[in-house]
Amino acid sequence: MSLTEKDKAAVKALWAKISKSVDAIGAEALGRMLLVYPQTKTYFSHWPDLTPGSAPVVSHGKQIMGGVTEAMSKIDNLRGGLLELSELHAFKLRVDPSNFKILAQTIMVVVAAMFPNDFTPEAHVAFDKFLAAVALGLSERYR
Amino acid sequence: MHNNQQGKMVAWTDFERATIKDIFSKIDYEVVGPAAISRCLIVYPWTQRYFAGFGNLYNAAAITSNPKVAAHGKVVMQGLEKAVKNMDNIKATFTELSTLHSEKLQVDPDNFMVGNAELMVLGPSNVCVCVDDVFHNCVVLQLLGDCLAIVVASQLGKDFSPEVHAAFQKFLAVVVSSLRRQYY
């Protein structure tokens, strides 16, 4: 399911609309993920506060979207362009890759809630493919 | 408080009950149902497998304007509404659906082909009798659930808070699990 030129154009068009709000999107998405899919809390047991809106959640959500922003700049080579991030997730964080899909879904729910008119079905399929490709890039170094 | 006669029951908090009923009172079934189904068919095109008899699904515009897709979206919402009205008995609610379906299967086995639109029958009390295949495949139900969450989020905006989202996700998970049929 590689990104076609049409997909990339759609993702870039959506990104143009949402990029000013990436920090907020990240914070929301992460907070939601921990609440809606509580099994993901296991990766953050060292945080004092896992509730939506808490300081570690907001800060880390920003960091995550920083990674997604970087992926946007590497959209033509997600497999090879995220190797450093992949090594981080593979060897240090050891996040099970199935969780990337979960976070992708919560990111998209937040985007849908914040930008209902822009997150059309066409934008949705392209963005879903993009986030799946990012997940694949992050999984590259796992084994 | 909860009827435990049927063994392991899902425990709903007061917040979850109120939230689910609130969501379903706020959303427009005529909009959300069709939007969720068409989004699923567009975003996850392999799910079109289950809609082979529905006519033109060639592109997003065709899917969005397809009347059979829209009709089925409403049927799905009616099914979910049944679950909302019977939150302590969701499994039993959908067992009823399954029984209705297998009885139909005995009577008209020729009508039950995958993708045959005729099998989307509205039985007594307008309950949908869906293809067995869909109910076995909880992955497609999960995909539809994800699309439903996104459509509801876009309808409710800020009202779809993280807590509301969590309650909705739990409701969907219970529905999907109740519809799944065990092979073993």
Image (tube, rainbow, N blue to C red):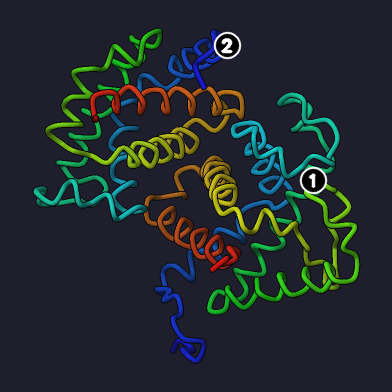
Whole-percent x, y for residue B21 in the image: 56, 66
Which of B46/B36 is in front?
B46
Q: What's the chain of the residue with tag 1?
A: B
For residue B101, side relative to residue B11 (left or right): right
Check the image and name the residue furthest to the front: B184
User: What residue does disc 1 label?
Assistant: B115
Does residue B3 lie above or below B13 as drawn?
below
Whole-percent x, y for residue A142 in the image: 24, 30
Residue B181's tag is none
Whole-percent x, y for residue A48 in the image: 9, 51
| Residue at image coords 16%, 47% | A44
Quadrant of the frame with the C terminus of chain A: top left
| Residue at image coords 78%, 68% | B101
At label 2, counting other C-alpha atoms closer than 10 Å, the crowd grade (few under 14, some 14-19, many 20 or more) is few
The quadrant in which residue A134 appears is top left
Secondary structure, mark 1, is loop
Amino acid type of the residue tagged 2 in the rendering: Lys
Secondary structure, mark 2, is helix
The quadrant in which residue A119 appears is top right
For residue B150, side relative to residue B66 (left or right): left
Label 1, label 2: how many angstroms apart (C-alpha)? 30 Å
Q: What's the chain of the residue with tag 2?
A: A
Whole-percent x, y for residue B127 in the image: 78, 67
Amino acid type of the residue tagged 1 in the rendering: Gly
Check the image and name the residue furthest to the bottom: B5
Does residue B7 lie above or below A137 as drawn?
below
User: What residue does disc 2 label?
Assistant: A6
